[in-house]
Image: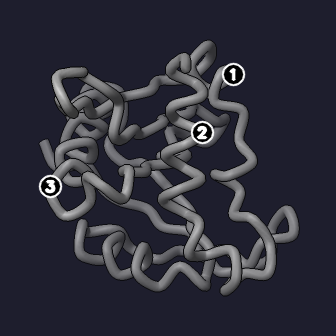
């Protein structure tokens, strides 16, 4: 399995609980991870599992006309609760700090756990609305120097 397939499998596992709540697959379950790896900035978290190092989480940064976006962050369920998400976020912000003073993300309104985590990390809600068929919540965060 290549890195793109591993990221897709992590996203599928990490977002599976949201399918019944949303009535459709969340966008991260439909993403083309090979394209993200080729075009965007992708951070991975690895862990040794049974003597083999494997990807257990990732974060993707994309650049859009209006700035940088955290397109996706996901951790495999077997690795959740170990601080990998926070470590990935620190890597994202360390990378972005010399490039910009803020970045954005969005999540689905049904993803209350994610929304709570975004608030806890210091993101501020900027907009709610239906975009691309998803009821989304948009956030922005200032990067501290």
Hey, which residue is sitting farthest front in the picture? Answer: 50
Q: Looking at the image, which residue is at 19% across and 64% down? A: 81
Q: Quarter of the image containing the N terminus?
A: top right
Residue 134 drawn at (x, y percent): 78, 71
Cβ atoms under marks 1 and 3 closer than 8 Å: no
User: Residues under labels 2 and 1: Cα distance?
Assistant: 12 Å
Mark before the other along the chain sequence, 2 or 1: 2
In the foreground, 77 or 108? 77
Please say if 78 is above or below 10: below
Considering every residue shown, the one lying at the far top of the view is 38
Find residue 23 and report its image quarter.
Answer: bottom right
How far apart marks 1 and 3 lie (CA) works out to 27 Å
Q: Earlier in the sequence, mark 1 or mark 3?
A: 1
Query: Around disc 3, counting alpha carbons within 10 Å, would you say few (fewer than 14), some (14 to 19), or many (20 or more)?
Result: few
Q: Residue at x 52, y 35 (%)?
A: 7
For residue 78, which quarter of the picture?
bottom left
Residue designated by label 1: 35
Instruction: State the image quarter where residue 123 is shown.
Output: bottom left
120 is higher (above) or lower (below) than 48: below
* Viewer-side residue, 37 vs 47: 47
Q: Which residue is mark 2?
A: 8
Count residues near mark 1 (Cα–Cα under 10 Å), then give few for <14, some for 14-19, many for 20+: few
Instruction: Give the SS element for disc 2.
Output: helix
Callout 1 secondary element = helix
Residue 145 circle label? none
- The residue indicated by pointer 3 is 83
Q: Given contact means CB atoms under 8 Å apart, are the residues at marks 2 and 1 in contact?
A: no
């Amino acid at each position: 399995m290549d890195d793109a397939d591993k990221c897709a499998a992590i996203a599928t596992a990490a977002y599976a609980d949201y399918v019944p709540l949303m009535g459709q697959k969340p966008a991260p379950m439909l993403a083309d991870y090979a394209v993200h790896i080729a075009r965007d900035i992708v951070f991975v978290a690895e862990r040794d599992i049974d003597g083999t190092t494997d990807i257990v989480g990732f974060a993707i940064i994309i650049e859009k006309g209006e700035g940088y976006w955290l397109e996706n962050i996901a951790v495999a369920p077997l690795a959740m609760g170990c601080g990998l998400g926070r470590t990935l976020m620190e890597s994202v912000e360390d990378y972005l700090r010399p490039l910009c003073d803020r970045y954005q993300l969005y999540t689905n309104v049904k993803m209350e756990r994610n929304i709570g985590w975004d608030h806890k990390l210091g993101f501020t809600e900027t907009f709610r609305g239906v975009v691309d068929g998803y009821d989304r919540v948009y956030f922005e965060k200032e990067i501290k120097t």
